[in-house]
Image: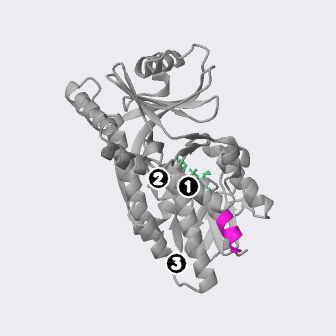
Amino acid sequence: VRTQVVVIGAGPAGLVLANALQQAGIDCVVAERETRRHVVNRARAGMLEHRTVELLRGLGLADGLLAKGSRRSSCEFRWDDRRVVLRYGELTGGREHHVYPQQHLVADLLDAFTAHGGTVLFSHPAVALSAGTVTLWPPRAVAPIDIGCDFVAGCDGFHGISRRTLHEHVGLHERSYPFGWVTALIQPPGGTDEVVYALHPNGFAGRMPRTATTSRCYLQCATADQVRDWPDERVRDELGRRLGEALPVRAEIAEKSVMRLRSSMVGGMTHANVALLGDAAHLVTPAGAKGMNLAVQDAVALADGLRVHYREGLRDPLPRYGRERLDKAWLAQEFSHWMLDLISGPEPGDPFARNLRLARVRRLLESRSFATAFARTYVGM
Ligand code: APR
């Protein structure tokens, strides 16, 4: 079997790439380890930047999110008894975030790709790859199959085989943080509202809307904490305390987990004819909501490079893709890192650190030039 591009992984990066290649008339096959049901139910990110939505719209892939998503152009910071709303849309000429759960976008992307004859091989993990061949293990098969190709697009996340295979060539730079975040999907009976960042002496708490009825909530915790340390009652109490609002006892709590916060960046996003995209190349913490946006933007950039390669004979399109996207990923990484430091720190209970953090938040909210610089980066201009 042979194709022009093998795409490994059917997350946002892989599926945006597959759709863009298909539209450019470039042959590709998507290989995904999990089932379709699994990937369209996997709840993760949900904030799409203005620029990401424009790119998706340009590919005709934004209908679902424009029809069913919601828009946000402000966020609220809370500390002590203060609640201050930052209207970043007003500082960016009306740019806003679109809120649409990642798994819904993935479902839309799958539908668009298959409706135009695209092939996604579900339950086909890639088990080996080289610059010109990807080896897949079909379900229940006794032997693997090889697919020959011109290019391999590694869109299989941080733990996928692509980054691991390229590791000795591209390396990895990592940072872990001395605290974790408990995350949970909450369905408050009254619906959900604003993005909230609360800086409480016990640590950070955040609330990010996902759909009209669900929010993803975050609670800073100790690195050693396990899910069993955070029964629903404790999550509810602590959210109520840190957000300064009682969470109704009837609010359903789902998909609770403890996230070890870390960031990582490959040293290079390409090697030979293999390109890394999305989480396979860079992990950012949820602070700043950059992960899904970077994944989509990587995919559009790679598809552009490959289109010029096949149409106009541009040789060797990968190095330029790798350089440009790694620079962008570092900018996003820096923002995410800065934002994490703004809202969350290793020292709940340390008044000096807390007051420094609060001074930084007040400067952000009180200085128009600081707020504008924040707003532009936050919304992805
Ligand atoms: N073979 C085939 N598929 C694989 C393999 C493998 N060996 N290993 C992993 N995969 C699949 C996973 O099952 C998953 O569906 O690759 C896909 C990777 O998708 P994502 O993790 O969603 O990564 P990406 O497309 O880069 O999107 C980044 O995801 O983690 C979130 O918040 C992050 O929003 C960001 C986004």
Can you identify the residue that label 2 sits on?
380
The answer to whether the residues at label 1 and label 2 have Cβ atoms under 8 Å apart is: yes
Magenta stretch: give its range: 19-26
Give the labeled residue for mark 1.
52
Residue 358 placement, left or right of 92: left
The answer to which quarter of the image holds residue 114 is bottom right
Which of 84/304 is in front? 84
Q: Quadrant of residue 314?
A: bottom right
**In the image, the residue with mark 1 has its CB under 8 Å from the nearest atom of ligand 1:** no
Query: Circle 3 sits in a helix, a strand or a loop, which is it?
Result: loop
First in sequence: mark 1 vs mark 3: 1
Say if residue 204 shows up in the picture: no
The kind of secondary structure the magenta stretch mainly shows is helix
- Amino acid type of the residue that numbered disc 1 sits on in the rendered structure: Thr
> Is mark 1 in CB contact (under 8 Å) with mark 3?
no
Q: Quadrant of the N terminus?
A: bottom right
**Image location (x, y in percent) of residue 167:** 43, 63
In the rendering, at what x and y percent does residue 224 appear? 38, 30
Residue 24, magenta (yes or no): yes
Alpha carbon of mark 1 to alpha carbon of mark 3: how far? 22 Å
In the figure, is residue 96 to the left or right of 219?
A: right
Residue at screen point 34% across, 36% down: 365
Q: Quadrant of the C terminus?
A: bottom left
Q: Is residue 67 above or below residue 206?
A: below
Q: Which residue is mark 3?
A: 317
The tag earlier along the polypeptide, 3 or 2, is 3
Query: Is residue 328 left or right of 275 when viewed as pictured?
Result: left
Residue 150 in picture, x, y percent from top left = 61, 77
